[in-house]
Image: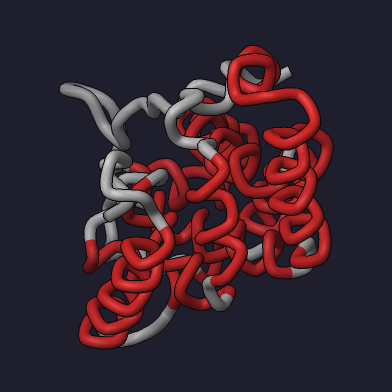
């Protein structure tokens, strides 16, 4: 099983091939593609886990890498870091689980009422901090449109730059900025003053 921590190995350490080089090499040596799994699966899984839960996250990661492998000949080798490309595929897979995501937010919200913050923290500690999943944030995230949520969580949870998010979502940089601004404004309106998060 994939570790759910969000730390990701960089695309290329000193002396290692870049993601683009690995993809190019994998055209002749398909097994080389596994290097990219080692580099990026953990952060993709952590992101999908936060949004969908364990079972769906594992499906998303598996589908993402399978589709990426099949589409590797279409990868733009001018981009040395393939992380935005993987997220582009993962976001499409997550969109197919939209109902699962909405149900997850509802279930998390009910958990606060039924079992309390402290118990919930124990159950989701391996996915995120208790502070992140406080009830007001769960409810605020549920109120965002999927497009707003995609941009916000890519920047906040996947640690993509605005430029990388634009590339992953295949939208202009200005659209990323405007969606992120709207999402942050909506989140702030639903959070009590005592909650300060990187999301906002």
Quadrant where the N terminus is found in the figure:
top right
Residue 141 rendering spot, x and y as whole percentages: 53, 60
Q: Is residue 29 visible?
A: no
Residue 117 rendering spot, x and y as whole percentages: 60, 24
- Direction left: furthest residue: 14
Residues 61 and 119: in front is 119
Residue positioned 44% across, 52% down in the render: 24
Residue positioned 50% across, 57% down in the render: 87
Q: Is residue 102 visible?
A: yes
Residue positioned 43% across, 29% down in the render: 131
Residue 60 rendering spot, x and y as whole percentages: 72, 49
Residue 188: quadrant of the picture: bottom left
Residues 47 and 37: in front is 47
Quadrant where the C terminus is found in the figure:
bottom left
Q: Is residue 199 above or below residue 196?
A: below
Q: Is residue 72 above or below residue 38?
A: below
Residue positioned 71% across, 47% down in the render: 52
Residue 17: quadrant of the picture: top left
Position of 52 with respect to 169 (left or right) is right
């Amino acid at each position: 099983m994939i570790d759910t921590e969000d730390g990701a190995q960089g695309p290329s350490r000193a002396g290692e091939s870049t993601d683009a080089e690995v993809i190019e090499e994998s055209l002749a040596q398909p097994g080389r593609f596994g290097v990219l799994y080692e580099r990026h699966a953990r952060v993709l899984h952590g992101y999908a886990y936060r949004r969908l839960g364990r079972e769906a996250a594992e499906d998303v990661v598996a589908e993402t890498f399978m589709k990426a492998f099949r589409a590797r000949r279409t990868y733009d080798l001018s981009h040395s870091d393939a992380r935005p490309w993987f997220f582009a595929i993962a976001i499409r897979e997550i969109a197919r689980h939209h109902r699962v995501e909405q149900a997850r937010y509802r279930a998390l919200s009910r958990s606060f009422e039924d079992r309390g913050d402290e118990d919930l923290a124990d159950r989701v500690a391996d996915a995120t901090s208790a502070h992140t999943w406080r009830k007001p944030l769960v409810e605020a995230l549920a109120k965002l449109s999927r497009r707003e949520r995609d941009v916000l969580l890519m920047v906040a949870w996947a640690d993509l730059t605005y430029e990388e998010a634009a590339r992953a979502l295949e939208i202009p940089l200005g659209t990323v900025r405007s969606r992120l601004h709207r999402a942050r404004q909506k989140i702030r309106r639903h959070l009590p003053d005592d909650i300060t998060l990187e999301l906002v």
